[in-house]
Amino acid sequence: MKDHLVKATAEGVRVYAAVTTELVNEAISRHDCYPVAAAALGRTMTGALLMAANLKNEEAITIKFNGGGPLGTVTADATPEGYVRGCVGEPHVNLPLNSLGKIDVGGGVGTNGLVTVTRFTGLKEPVSGSCELTDGEIADDLMNYLYVSEQTPSSVGLGVLVDKEFKCIGAGGFIIQPLPGASDEVIDKLESNLRKVNSVSRMVERGLDAKGIIEELLEGFEVSCLSTTDLAFRCHCSKERIGGVLASLDKQDIDSLIQDGQAEVVCHFCGEKYQFDKEELQAIASSSKRD
Ligand code: ZN
């Protein structure tokens, strides 16, 4: 099943659901993630895609988790067109399973810090908000962020299943938000449905697509699906952009690269490697303006 996101509404609630198994596997292979990193990054990327889904074209969102745990910072950037990229400070973290027998994402991310969400809306300055972490497990942290910082009550579910070979075998998530004026009856029915849901990654493993996830979450509701968007891991780095970064180095640093005769620069968001030979480095050095 290709990764995708479905937007739907039902009787006063808005729901977005996504299947993200392939893009999580791409992140695992690009960053060589062990399971704790794979689950933390996979949940963050899925959350970012779901939160980006109601942005306008050309807008974007960045979510950063800084919880002081062994994973370091977990970052994901997503767009409403369905593209996401992400990285984790330390992908090689090993932790025992938590008391529920699950990957210990909260232990990896840590709980001593903030989740920061930045929206790039085409205005001059991006809009940024942050919130103390709840449990470092990502979904509840985002739910709390949406409630505290954006006054949007939401229910958020995110899940990533990783097998013994460090391969993702099911990843996905959902966000449900009552629309203004949703009746108490609808909210009660929704809450009772959500209590029955145990794991969104197991739903994906069972073969449900995003529409199937929504139908299970909103059992008994009249659901109308509004749109489906394909999702993919995509970074907007390029040799030209990386060259621009090199051009901003101090003269001393770029001269030392020229002396080495070549340079390899790795994009930390996607792991792509860019090689620059001596002539290219000289061209960058002479094109950049410096005293
Ligand atoms: Zn990149």
Image (tube, rainbow, N blue to C red):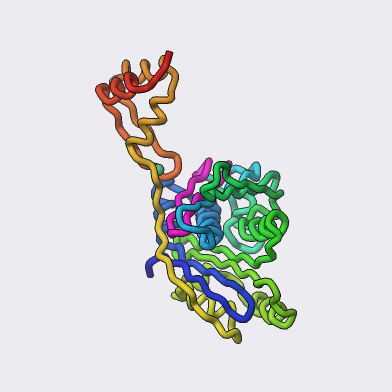
Q: Residue furthest front?
A: 123
Q: Is residue 93 above or below residue 139?
A: above
- Using the image as rendered, state which of residue 20 and residue 10 is in the foreground: 10
Residue drawn at x 43%, y 47% as measured from the top left: 32
How many numbered discs sit on the rendered protein?
0
Name the quadrant where ligand 1 sits.
Answer: top left
Q: Is residue 111 visible?
A: yes
Percent position of residue 210, x then y: 48, 72
Left or right, 242 with respect to 151, comes to: left
The question of residue 86 being in magenta is answered with: yes
Residue 176, position as x, y percentages in the image: 61, 70
Judge from the rendering whether residue 170 lies leftward or rightward of residue 255; answer left or right: right
201 shown above or below 186: above
| Residue found at x 55% / y 53% | 40
Residue 225 is left or right of residue 30, and the answer is right
Q: Position of residue 180 (x, y in %)?
A: 68, 71
Q: Is residue 16 magenta?
A: no
Residue sitting farthest toward the right: 184
Q: Position of residue 168 (x, y in %)?
A: 45, 60
Query: Which segment did they paint magenta?
Result: 71-92
Q: Is residue 165 visible?
A: no
Furthest residue to the left?
A: 279
Q: Quadrant of the N terminus?
A: bottom left
Say if 134 sits above or below 278 in the image.
below
Residue at 53 percent of width and 56 percent of height: 48
Q: Residue furthest top?
A: 291
Q: Quadrant of residue 233?
A: bottom left
Quadrant where the image shows the C terminus:
top left
Residue 21's place in the image compared with 197, above or below, is above
- Decide which of 228, 208 is in the foreground and name it: 228
